[in-house]
Image (tube, helix red, strand yellow):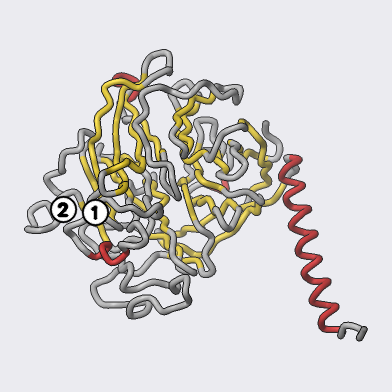
Amino acid sequence: MPRPGRRAVLAALAVLGLLVAGAMAFAAEEAGAPRRFAGEAVRVVPFAEGLEHPWAIAFLPDGRLLVTEREGRLRVVDRSGQLMPPIAGVPQVAARGQGGLLDVALDPAFATNRLVYLSYSEPRPDGAATSVARGRLSEDFSKLSDLQVIFRQQPGHSGGNHFGSRLVFAPDGMLFVTLGDRFDLMDKAQDLSTTLGKVVRIAPDGSIPADNPFRDRPGARPEIFSYGHRNVQAGVIEPATGRLWTVEHGPRGGDEVNRPEAGKNYGWPVIAYGRHYSGAKIGVGTRKEGMEQPLFYWDPSIAPSGAAFYSADLLPAFRGQLFVGALAGQALVEVKIRDGAVTGEERLALGKRIRDVRQGPDGALWLATDDTGEILRVVPAAGK
């Protein structure tokens, strides 16, 4: 047998070195060992386990968590990390492919009205589509009552991909809902008669705000705020400005960070920084007049999911920065922001699919892992 050449040996050693380094990083994370990330010495520590594909986290006023499981369960996780029984009264979901029970958000006046909002893939006669329902959480956290569907994406579709969806309350009390293009229907992201591939803006009861950009345009859906999106799985309000930021999945490359503005077109599938899974070119390329450019994009893709702006004091170097979960990238990603512009990124490798990211009332960053069913906390290395 011929001996391998020097170049092949060096390449093999390099790959081995990367594997060892990655294994050491993951081992350090599992042990809660200090690691340097985004200007801070941090540890990643477990809080809860035993969840099935957790999709979203919301913090109750007393510090407990509401967590959605994609299969259709809504749970409370108590302050010690114990899972409570599933909450009754959750709407039926089409739990197939990427669909199921998705985001959860508390009404801004939850302390007095106890309203909880859920986005989910709703079974329909023509397949399924993303819907938003709200219900009143009982005082003992055991059930939702008075359930009402306040929004339904149109049209439905039989496929199981690209449902979105995040729920984001704006400072003016309106509700943003981010929506996917349903993959097979991607061209509808440019069609204002549908809510595929859109960000919509509604009042908490589902009514249409008077200042929505397409409210008075014939043939357009009045709830649309922005369009030309692919599959937006992160939406968050920037504390310093009150503006909406979104992060969406690209195809092969081209995951995007955007700051949607009323009535604007973000290009999908006419322009994109990526290619179809077949390798074919998308649309006309990366630019077209009248279509907005992303603030930042990833190529290759990280498959981004939930995100949070950091505004607490526990991790001072994090303040003002955007933190994004990565599914395929299996990391927590800091999107570095300065004067409203994205200047770069940094990654904390975790070896787990990060589905949601939230800032907790304790100042920690809280993460939900899609594959291992955990809730994790990112805390100072010297903290608990």
Nearer to the camera, 358 or 42 = 358
| Rendered location of residue 197, percent (x, y) | 30, 58
- Residue where numbered disc 1 is placed: 195
Which residue lies at the image location 35% right of the left edge and 33% below the top edge? 92
- Residue where numbered disc 2 is placed: 221
- Inspect the image, locate mark 1, and give the three-letter code of the amino acid beneath it: Thr
Task: Tell whether label 1 touches label 2 (CB within 8 Å).
Answer: yes
Q: Residues within 10 Å of mark 2 (few under 14, many from 20)?
A: many
Regarding mark 2 in the picture, which secondary structure is present there? loop
Q: Is residue 328 left or right of residue 278?
A: right
| Rendered location of residue 265, percent (x, y) | 26, 65
Quarter of the image where one finds residue 290: bottom left
Q: Quadrant of the C terminus?
A: top right
Res 164 visible: yes
Res 170 visible: no
Which residue lies at the image location 59% right of the left edge and 45% below the top edge? 371
- Compared to residue 127, the image places residue 312 above or below, namely above
Quarter of the image where one finds residue 229: bottom left
Q: Is residue 13 left or right of residue 189?
A: right
- Inspect the image, locate mark 2, and give the three-letter code of the amino acid beneath it: Arg
In terms of sequence position, does the residue under pointer 2 or pointer 1 come before the other?
Answer: 1
